[in-house]
Every structure is written in structure tokens, then in C-alpha cells.
């Protein structure tokens, strides 16, 4: 008899305030360069630069907006799949039953990930040793699963609780 795989997926929300503050930062940066270019360049050159900058800005905002909105945890059979925008990590679902240790975000360095206002996702290193997958939204503290004495998976308390509640 064939085993039926259950698939449960939950969306991990980012607060509107976090989205707004991160997007406003990019808008202000764009406006700064727009005014700077307008004040020093000729009008003909600036029109071309305006088009290029506007296109790059729109693409950047779309990518960052997607990154901030695309946070998902999926239970696929006995596997937990965490997705934070571009970053994806698979774990056995049993890791949720292991002991977790609380750490501060300032103990980590970004290796390959996003570090924005109240949003951290991707690969981070702890005290310069090893690396871990992190998804921290609207929190300065994370719960970390330690393997060989170092964090391997870190989630903020709300994300951790949402995932535990959705576990089949």
C-alpha cells in the first residue's frame, strides 16, 4: 500500500509597518539621486538617466517587495521546507521537537542574505563560525536550533510558534 504524503503550507506574514519602512527607504534614496542628477546634469542627459534609474528602481523595489512577502513554511511528509524569498532550506520535521536556544541578532553576521529593517533572511554566521539559515521578522531575538554547539536554524518567536501550530 502506498504511503499518502501530507502537505501543509503556511504563509509567514511580514507586518505592514516593516514593509512600509523598508520601501520608504528605497523611495527616499531614489528621490535623493533624482534631485542630485537634476541639479548637476544637463536636461537631455538627465532624461536618459531618469529612464534608466526609474527602471532599475522599479525592478529593485519589486524584488525587495517580493522577498519581504514570500515567506513560507511547508510540511511535505516528514520534511519541513522553509522558504524566505530567494532562500530555501529543508529540514527533517523532527527538528521542531529538539531544544532551541534564544540568541540576539547582533551575534550574527550576514553571509548571503537580506538584512533590512526588522527583516533578516538567508545564510548568517554565528561568531564567525559555520553558518545557519535565518528567518527573523520584527524581532531582535531569535530561537536557534544548535547542531555541534552552533546555531544551524534560527527563527523569530512568532515564526517558530506559527510553524509549531501548523505541524501535522
Image: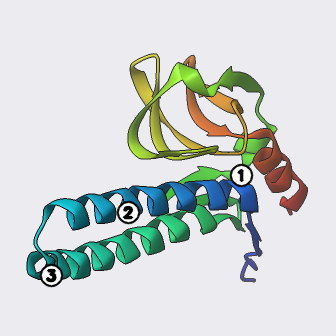
57 sits to left or right of 12:
left
Q: Evaluate whether residue 37 shows in this view.
A: yes
Give the quarter of the image for residue 153: top right
Give the quarter of the image for residue 59: bottom left
Q: Which residue is mark 2?
A: 30
- CA distance for labels 3 and 2: 15 Å
Q: Earlier in the sequence, mark 3 or mark 2?
A: 2
Give the residue drawn at x 40%, y 56%: 29
Q: Which residue is mark 1?
A: 93
Give the residue drawn at x 51%, y 54%: 25
Q: Nearer the viewer, mark 1 or mark 2?
A: 2
Number of residues whose C-alpha sits closer than 10 Å to that of mark 2, classed few (under 14), some (14–19) or many (20 or more):
some
46 sits to left or right of 105:
left
Number of residues whose C-alpha sits closer than 10 Å to that of mark 3, classed few (under 14), some (14–19) or many (20 or more):
few
Q: Which residue is mark 3?
A: 48
Q: Nearer the viewer, residue 126 or 68?
A: 68
Q: Earlier in the sequence, mark 1 or mark 2?
A: 2
Give the residue drawn at x 44%, y 32%: 131
Amino acid at each position: 500500500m502506498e504511503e499518502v504524503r501530507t502537505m501543509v503550507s503556511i504563509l509567514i506574514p511580514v507586518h505592514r509597518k516593516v514593509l512600509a519602512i523598508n520601501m520608504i527607504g528605497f523611495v527616499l534614496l531614489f528621490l535623493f539621486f533624482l534631485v542630485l542628477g537634476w541639479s548637476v546634469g544637463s536636461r537631455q542627459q538627465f532624461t536618459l538617466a531618469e529612464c534608466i534609474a526609474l527602471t532599475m528602481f522599479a525592478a529593485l523595489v519589486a524584488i525587495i517587495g517580493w522577498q519581504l512577502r514570500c515567506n513560507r513554511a511547508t510540511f511535505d511528509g516528514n520534511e519541513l521546507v522553509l522558504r524566505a524569498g530567494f532562500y530555501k532550506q529543508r529540514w527533517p520535521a523532527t527538528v521542531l521537537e529538539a531544544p532551541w536556544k534564544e540568541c540576539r541578532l547582533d551575534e550574527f553576521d550576514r553571509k548571503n542574505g537580506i538584512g533590512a529593517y526588522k527583516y533578516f533572511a538567508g545564510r548568517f554566521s554565528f561568531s564567525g563560525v559555520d553558518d545557519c539559515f535565518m528567518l527573523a521578522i520584527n524581532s531582535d531575538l531569535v530561537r536557534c536550533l544548535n547542531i555541534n554547539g552552533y546555531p544551524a536554524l534560527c527563527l523569530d518567536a512568532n515564526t517558530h510558534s506559527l510553524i509549531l501550530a501548523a505541524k501535522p
